[in-house]
Structure formats: structure tokens, C-alpha cells
Image (cartoon, rainbow, N blue to C red):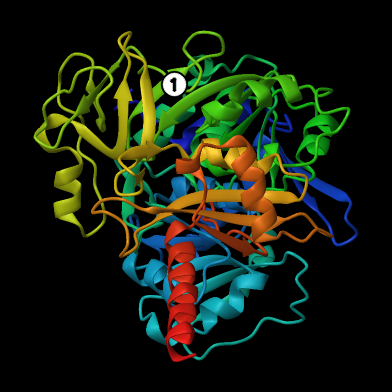
């Protein structure tokens, strides 16, 4: 597969146009200002024709093969059309969270040396405010999302035009220039939950490998997959979108994730499978139970991070099976199909991969002992190199010793099933015991007044070396007030003393990445500031 150019995205779309040109392969849905669901769809023919128009527009902007441009929008059909156009032109697209602004946005655009951007109207101001600090930025195409932008602003140096002008042009006939699966397809930024994100130089081969998993991840002809995850993240882009496009499955994609409308969307579009990441599972589970929770068309949930503490309750309540998996954008994969592996396990690697738990010296550890989750070929061959843009040291470290190093800590049981324990550096140890945050989150999520919860560890001067205090960040349901004493009293009824939170952080919203991962760093810094201020006030009182 590594050298099969027919698996380059644009070639796949062109081939599908010959087979099923008018299949409505993608349906995009969003909640409008009237709180109703609105939709638009795209066929293979539309994806190809608009991809051709975008490729022609990139030529008009003097974009050379290998040049980078950003996609700054939520999940719109134009995102996918730009992916196709970039593949035709053999440029490199850079997906960026549409909520990014200020220094974060500047870092993403400058580090990736983007020469242009296709940007949603609501994010345009944030980009233009940075234009003078982005000398590589030459052009902006603006997507009209109905955000109320009356007219396009001008800029003395950066060319600004409407994306609709590009898409209203005639359909050209540009040959697909991408010719090698190892050519870079995109710069995919890591989540950056602990600092500035790294930019993965992701080749066409990586997208094609994930998009070709199909039956290995449980998909069947006739399935209708759904995702509310951002297309800036590998899960939505490669697993849901990629497999739908490669298999001809009629996928449904929400503009943004909405847990309150999730099951309504799944029922309306008769979706048979949807994807969840760790933080989302607790949020969905914390929604108030309804009599019709189990009345839905979903066959299974493809989950990365389903807490063992709610696994069976989640499956029973919503009448679904859980297909648990683990993977990263750079590499590695384990699968635990429904009814095959033990509850709580992330599975075993597919036949072409080997997974080992290694200590800090690169030695395999015995079952039950924690270490880093690592991968290489089942044949024993070294893992292919991973490239991070302008970061040769991180690139070399990622595959040192021939193993792909995930940076995640886990263990195996005696039968070889793999378990994820925590991200390296983010585990919680208290009074000599490793704490499972999911166990605490389940108890809190089952409170009638809780809409969302995330439990994390906070290093504190009074803790023993390597240990942390337990913090529960919680969001109240509308119309409810969460009292600290009430929450702690509830936890005391269901949790042992060592699992009781030391601090309760009541928030309007838990800050999350585009992939719905809670931003622990932001929460921790906010709480540290509050605790420091309170300590100072006590000392001066």
C-alpha cells in the first residue's frame, strides 16, 4: 500500500465519481439560530468539481507544490472540498481549530509557514489582526457561514476574497499532481494540552492506511457513520470521513459536537455507528436519563477512552455495543471489538502490528506492571519514521530503538490485553495509590445537577513527591446550583476516602481542545491562581 498512488485522496474521489457520482456520501448538519437542525449534503461529483475549482484557485494564488495553507473553520463541506483540492494541487493543508485566536493562532500559522488560509467569516478578524506578524501570509478566502459579515474587509498586503467566488468558477480539468503516498498531505497539529503543539508532517499514506481500516473497525456496507468531532482531528478526519469516502458510506457530520442533540441527530439520519473520545463519554453519560435512551439505530459506539466504570451502564442505557480502540495520529493501534476483550481494555494490536509495554530503558515489563505503550511491525521490523515539522529531536525520539513511543502509560494482563492508564506526566498518585479519575467522574456525573465533569491531579506543596491533590472540575445543568458541600457529601456516600476530591472547580464550561479533550493545563493554572489569591488574602486578613 505504501506506494499505491490510487489511494491518494483525489484519486479515490475521482474513481468514486466514475462509480457512484451522485451518492450523497456526506451530510453536514448544524443547529441553527432557530434551534432547528439544518443540513446540506455533498456527492462525490460535487466534491470532485469543487476540489477542481479550489485547485485552480490555488494556482491563481501562485501556490507551489508543497506550499502550506490553513483551513480555519468548523465542520463544513468546504473543509472536505479543500482537502480534495489540495490533493489535486499537491499542496499541504493545515487544519486549525476555528476557535483559535491571539498568540495561539499566530503560533499555528507562523510555525507552519502558511501562505494563505480558507477561513470562516467568524474567524476572519482574528486572522487579520495577526496579518502584519505573518509575513508569509499572502491570501485569505472567506467562507460565508451567515455570521453577519456585511462586506469583506480589505488589507494593504493580504488579498482577501470570498470562497464563493472560487466555487462559482467553471470546473477546470486539472490532473492530480500528488503522485506518491509518502508526499505530505497535511500538517496535523497535536492537541497541545501541555504546551505548544507539534506539527505532524502527515503523508497521504497515513490517511489512506486509517481510511482503509473498514471491517477491522467494525464497519459494514450500508453502515451510516456519524461524528461530531472536529475535522481538524485525526479521529473525525481519518476514521469517520476517510472510511466513509473510501467505502462509499453515507456519513453524517455535525458542524460542532452537541451532546444535547446527539441522539436526535442519530435517530433522524438513522446512523448505525458513531465515535466518542474519552472526555465526551462522561459528558454524554451525564445527560439526564430519558425513557427512550435505548430507542436508537446505533449498532455500536467506536470509543477511545470509554471508562471501565461506566462501560456496561453506558451500553445498557443506550442499547449499544462498545468497540473500544486506541490510536494516535502518528501511529499505533489496538482494537477491542464488542464481546471479544475484557471491559476496560483498549484491546490488542491488529495482525500487522506488535504492541509492548516498555520501561524507561526500553525493556519489556511483565504483565500488570506499568510502562510506556509502544508499537512496531509484527515482523520485528522497526517502526517507520515519524516527522514533526522543524523538530528533528522529537522526531528521532518518537521512534527511538525501532519502537513507536506513544507517550502513554499502560499495562498488559496475563492474556496480552492492553490497558491505558494515563498520559505520561498526568497520572494521579495519592497516598501511594494510583487513582482512576473515571471512577470519580462516574459518581459525580450521576448527580442530577451535573452537566459535565473532569477529574485531574494538582501537584501541591503539601503533597509527597510525585503525588497530587484530586480536583473535580464540574459544570452544573442549566437552572441548577452546585454547592461544594453537596458534591463532596454525594462523593462521600459512594467513594472511599482516598478518592474524595480535595478541590471542586465549578465552571460555566470545561475548556476543551477541538477533539473534546479537556485542557488540563488551563484548568490547573486557573485553580492555582485562585488558590494562591485565597492564600494571600488569608495571610493579609
Q: Between residue 14 and residue 363, name the one nearer to us.
A: 363
Report the number of numbered marks: 1
Q: Between residue 518 and residue 157, name the one nearer to us.
A: 518
- Secondary structure under tag 1 reads loop
* 279 left or right of 254 in image: left
At 69% from the left and 18% from the top, the residue drawn is 299
Residue to which mark 1 is pinned: 345
At 29% from the left and 44% from the top, the residue drawn is 424
Q: Between residue 194 and residue 235, name the one nearer to us.
A: 194
Quick check: can you spot residue 52? no
At 63% from the left and 62% from the top, the residue drawn is 506
Find residue 422 and report its horizontal and vertical position in percent.
37, 39
Find residue 78 and report its horizontal and vertical position in percent.
63, 53
Find residue 250 and report its horizontal and vertical position in percent.
70, 29
The quarter of the displayed image where residue 109 is located: bottom left
Looking at the image, residue 452 lies above or below residue 238: below
Quick check: can you spot residue 127? yes
* 29 left or right of 381 in image: right
Amino acid at each position: 500500500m505504501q506506494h499505491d498512488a490510487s489511494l491518494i485522496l483525489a484519486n479515490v474521489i475521482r474513481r468514486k465519481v466514475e462509480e457512484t457520482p451522485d451518492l450523497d456520501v456526506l451530510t453536514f448538519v448544524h443547529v441553527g439560530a432557530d434551534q432547528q437542525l439544518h443540513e446540506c449534503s455533498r456527492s462525490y461529483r460535487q466534491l470532485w468539481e469543487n476540489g477542481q475549482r479550489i485547485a485552480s484557485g490555488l494556482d491563481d494564488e501562485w501556490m507551489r507544490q508543497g506550499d502550506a495553507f490553513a483551513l480555519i473553520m468548523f465542520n463544513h463541506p468546504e473543509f472536505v472540498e479543500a482537502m480534495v483540492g489540495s490533493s489535486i494541487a499537491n499542496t499541504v493543508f493545515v487544519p486549525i481549530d476555528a476557535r483559535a485566536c491571539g498568540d495561539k493562532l499566530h503560533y499555528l500559522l507562523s510555525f507552519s509557514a502558511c501562505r494563505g488560509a480558507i477561513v470562516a467569516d467568524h474567524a476572519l478578524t482574528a486572522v487579520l489582526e495577526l496579518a502584519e506578524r505573518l509575513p508569509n501570509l499572502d491570501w485569505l478566502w472567506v467562507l460565508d457561514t451567515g455570521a453577519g459579515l456585511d462586506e469583506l474587509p480589505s488589507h494593504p498586503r493580504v488579498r482577501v476574497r470570498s470562497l464563493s467566488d472560487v466555487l462559482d468558477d467553471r470546473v477546470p480539468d486539472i490532473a492530480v499532481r500528488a503522485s506518491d503516498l509518502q508526499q505530505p498531505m497535511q500538517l496535523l497539529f497535536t492537541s497541545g494540552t501541555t504546551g505548544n503543539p507539534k506539527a505532524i508532517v502527515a503523508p497521504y499514506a497515513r490517511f489512506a492506511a486509517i481510511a482503509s481500516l473498514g471491517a477491522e473497525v467494525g464497519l459494514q456496507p450500508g453502515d451510516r457513520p456519524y461524528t461530531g468531532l472536529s475535522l481538524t482531528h485525526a479521529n473525525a478526519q481519518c476514521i469517520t470521513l476517510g472510511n466513509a469516502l473510501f467505502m462509499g458510506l453515507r456519513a453524517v457530520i455535525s458542524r460542532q459536537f452537541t451532546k444535547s442533540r446527539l441522539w436526535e441527530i442519530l435517530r433522524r439520519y438513522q446512523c448505525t455507528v458513531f465515535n466518542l473520545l474519552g472526555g465526551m463519554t462522561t459528558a454524554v453519560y451525564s445527560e439526564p436519563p430519558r425513557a427512550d435512551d435505548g430507542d436508537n439505530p446505533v449498532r455500536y459506539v467506536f470509543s477511545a477512552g470509554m471508562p471501565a466504570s461506566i462501560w456496561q451502564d453506558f451500553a445498557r442505557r443506550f442499547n449499544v455495543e462498545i468497540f473500544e480502540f486506541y490510536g494516535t495520529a502518528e501511529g499505533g493501534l489496538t482494537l477491542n471489538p464488542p464481546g471479544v476483550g475484557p471491559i476496560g481494555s483498549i484491546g490488542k494490536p491488529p495482525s500487522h502490528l506488535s504492541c509492548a509495554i516498555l520501561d524507561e530503558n526500553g525493556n519489556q515489563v511483565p504483565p500488570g506492571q506499568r510502562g510506556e505503550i509502544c508499537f512496531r511491525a509484527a515482523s520485528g521490523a522497526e517502526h517507520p519514521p515519524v516527522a514533526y515539522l522543524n523538530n528533528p529531536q522529537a522526531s528521532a525520539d518518537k521512534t527511538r530503538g525501532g519502537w513507536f513511543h506513544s507517550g502513554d502509560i499502560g499495562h498488559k494482563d496475563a492474556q496480552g490485553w492492553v490497558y491505558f492508564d494515563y498520559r505520561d506526566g498526568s497520572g494521579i498518585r495519592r497516598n501511594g495509590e494510583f487513582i482512576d479519575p473515571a471512577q470519580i467522574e462516574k459518581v459525580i456525573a450521576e448527580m442530577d445537577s451535573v452537566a459535565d465533569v473532569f477529574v485531574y491531579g494538582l501537584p501541591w506543596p503539601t503533597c509527597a513527591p510525585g503525588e497530587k491533590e484530586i480536583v473535580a472540575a464540574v459544570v452544573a445543568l442549566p437552572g441548577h446550583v452546585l454547592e461544594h458541600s453537596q458534591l463532596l457529601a454525594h462523593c462521600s456516600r459512594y467513594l472511599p476516602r482516598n478518592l474524595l476530591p480535595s478541590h471542586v472547580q465549578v465552571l460555566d464550561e470545561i475548556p476543551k481542545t477541538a477533539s473534546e479533550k479537556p485542557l488540563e493545563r488551563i484548568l490547573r493554572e486557573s485553580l492555582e491562581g485562585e488558590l494562591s489569591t485565597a492564600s494571600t488574602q488569608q495571610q493579609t486578613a
